Image (spheres, coloured by chain):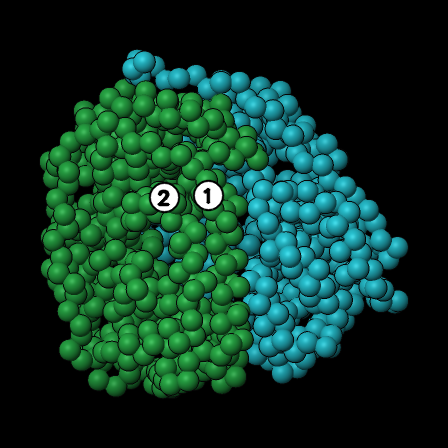
Amino acid sequence: MPADRTRLPEPGPDHPFVFPEIRRRRLPNGVRVWTVEHRQVPLVSVLCLLPVGASADPPDRPGLAAIAADMLDEGSGDRSALDVYEALGRMGAQLDTDVGHDATLVSLTTLERFLQPGLDLVADMLMHPRLEQREFDRVRDLRLNRLLQLRDMPPAQADRAFTHLLFRNHPYGHLPLGSEGALRAMTVRELAAFHRSAFDPARMTIVLVGDATHDVLAEAAARAFGGWTPSADAPPPIDPVAAAPPPAVASRLALVHRPGAAQSELRIGQVAVSRETPDYHALLVVNMVLGGQFISRLNLKLREEKGYTYGARTAFEFRRAPGPFVFQASVQSDATTDAVRETLAELRAIRGERPVTRQELELGRAALTRGYPRSFETADQIARAAAQLALYGLPDDYFSRFVPMVLALDEAQVTRAAAAHLDPPRLLTVIVGDRDRLAPSLASLDMGDAADVAVG
Amino acid sequence: MNIPFTKHTLGNGLDVLVHEDHGCPIVAVSVWYHVGSKNERPGRTGFAHLFEHLMFEGSQHYDRGYFHPLQEAGASLNGSTNADRTNYWEVAPTSALELALWMESDRMGYLLPALTTAKFENQRDVVLNERRQNYENRPYGLAGMAIVSALFPPDHPYHWLTIGEAADLHAARLEQVKAFFQTYYRPRNASLALAGDVDTARAIALAEQYFGEIESGEPPPPVDAAPPPPLASEIRMLLEDRVELPRLYLAWHSPALFAGGDAELDLVAELLASGKTSRLYRALVYDQRLATEVAASQNSRELGSFFQVVATAAPGRTLAELERAITREIATLVDKGPTETEMERCLAQAEAHFIYRLQTVGGFGGKSDQLNAYNVFRNDPAYFERDLARYRNATAGALQQMAGRYLRSARAVLSVVPRGRLALALPGSQPVAVS
């Protein structure tokens, strides 16, 4: 039968997607052990979730949580730093430590036959990091060098300025990487104190996903983590949810001067919503329409229609406390002002002037729901998904309810969510680019003078 | 360990590979065209990659952009171009397999009637912005151009990077781009792999239905490139850039992809710089703190590879110190060979990496991509097991021998230094003109 090219084939009915069963146990010391069987490949992924991240950094020590996590694999218990590295290498294991604003995630993927030694190693790192001065000095130097190099990277400069200006003194007002001054002032005593206060077995969730039965996975975790006892008198870490909301931005336009820049790096956004918002699903659709996929309004406008950029995108960062909505793009220098103007216009328009259409709604819903199973293919993906349930206190049936919740939305609800949570007068625009080239045309935006932001 | 598959070649020469994996209700569609920047000529660089962009702009029977219907159907999709090949992929819910095949076959068979000057000019601007973002405006972004231009002579197709020269992109004409399509985007120069929640017989029937009608075309001309001549002596180059820390690049010619010595040098790269107990990391970053980071890689390519070591100086340390330390570590490896412990570690890592690649059905990497790679480069999609055996059978003696043969020949050496700080470059380095 020859192909019918007069019309596109209709996609068939969606195959039902069922999130694999999570079995939950709790060890006597409070550690939660969650297991998922995933038998496709002879691998296991172990994800340790600690719901304490960079927002718990003391105000004068931005970067403490991240460097504490960095020090986990620099020697623990009887193992020196080199012993730890060697043990990981011999298992061919992939260790990944990720400190976000809300959480610290330590993950290990390895061959199934290394399940127990892999878990023992990770447990030892979390429970008994050595935090030695010598290793700390080296790790801190590497971190300082990294900060130095980021000064040359426009995306990093833009993220940094945007975060500082938007959140100010709020616990979300700094990047996890921290600042040079704070890193230089830090001591191993402070690290040890942070570790005692944050790394408490009662806060920890261990998610194990892989080529073994629930019982085998859970028993291995119990052997590794069962001996963990909490520190008696440690004060609890700073909680971003308890903090006062950040004040309004002082200036709507800020510029980081980068002489001779071939492109301008843009961030446009505002403080938006927390993960708890009842509009969560509607805002995911709003984002799909605005900048969450290739065929979004902003990418089509700035890339496909204008050719200003290699790509433009937006995201709501749903965190425990309200996180940012942010647009980002790197645009050719002489199109900077036009790109900002077009973007602001799109962010205004979706609130009602050009509401979400039926077709956009269907596209956005479809991309979110039909593509949903793709997010749960590997053991590591499943573990990270399960960890979201623990971090945000989501219900057990969250993943199976996701698709029906999104499909139940209509275009009016989505436009209403955009209008409720995008607030054009509050949008902050940060530009990393050549001030001298940009200044004359930026004046035409009528957003006041661009505040100069120093590189730090 | 393997990727079980069925291979079926259509009448027009298109290879179809199918692998069933019903673990997740998704299917990967991967199309490789055996064309990359190595098929370009001086003065016409950047075509293969620019062309990849145009493949997303619509074809005769659906001329409203490539992303729209596929994203609506829940697929993710992308493409990429390198020196040797161009790939396109979709990972779609099982229900959208037929749609993905319709779309891929339409742009394979019927792209040109829909290709307009406006699309061409718009995508050329997008590519020029991609070049600014990833090369011109990125710290150390031009180093790769300097290295390949030193290792490969001007008429060798590895002399330029896949992104191409900005002047060539500006000079490109629609007619030239159309001729490029007619020469290289042919079923017999392509390979289609489907992996995931699919029935083999149905997959082959659908491939036949959608791709079978496309004309096979003439075989593309072979790449006419002599092996790159060895460097007569060390080349020392210098590049000023907007960076804080100087960085050193050392590069040597090395055996082509899958040629003898290729896997051994891959393992040499592993034991030199993968993980913190690797020789260079341990010496330069951990013990002596000369460098903030170090990397080593065997960059395997069809017409000849290059082995590269890159290290960034810690503040206050010099590139001359880095160069001495790296040269010393390589000399020790060549003299004494790897230890038994090192061999165990790097073989464990190599084996684990083979298994990690089996976790996904497609995308950048994954099983469909792997099948296509073996089919296109080896004409043997079953090569997985033998590829792994190249690593398992590598001996300490062979690593030592290959390191000695290739890493003691003349090198291309590049110092990237902060603007105006020329004294930080290795002595005797000459400024290199790349932009």
Question: Which amino acid type corresponds to the residue marked 2 in the rendered image?
Answer: Pro
Quarter of the view holding residue B80 = top left
The reply to whether the C-beta atoms of the residues labelled 2 and 1 are less than 8 Å apart is: yes
- Mark 1 burial class by Cα count in 10 Å: few <14, some 14-19, many 20+: some
Chain A shown in which color?
A: cyan
Quarter of the view holding residue A197 = bottom right
Residue at 75% in and 35% down: A395
What is the secondary structure assignment of the residue under circle 1? loop
- In this view, the residue in front, B178 or A250, is B178
In the rendered image, the vertical position of residue B258 relative to residue A41, given as above or below: below
- In this view, the residue in front, B390 or B175, is B390
Q: What residue would you read off at disc 1?
A: B3
Residue at 46% in and 40% down: B4
Residue at 59% in and 64% down: A91
Could you tell whether A50 is left or right of B65 in the image?
right
Question: Which amino acid type corresponds to the residue marked 1 in the rendered image?
Answer: Ile
Q: Find residue A456 and report its horizontal and vertical position in percent.
A: 49, 67
Residue at 24% in and 21% down: B213
Is residue B372 visible in the rendered image? The answer is: yes
Can marks 2 and 1 be said to lie on one chain?
yes
Mark seen at residue B381:
2
In the rendered image, the vertical position of residue B189 relative to residue A198, given as above or below: above
What is the secondary structure assignment of the residue under circle 2? helix
- In this view, the residue in front, A61 or B105, is B105
C-alpha gap between disc 2 and disc 1 = 9 Å
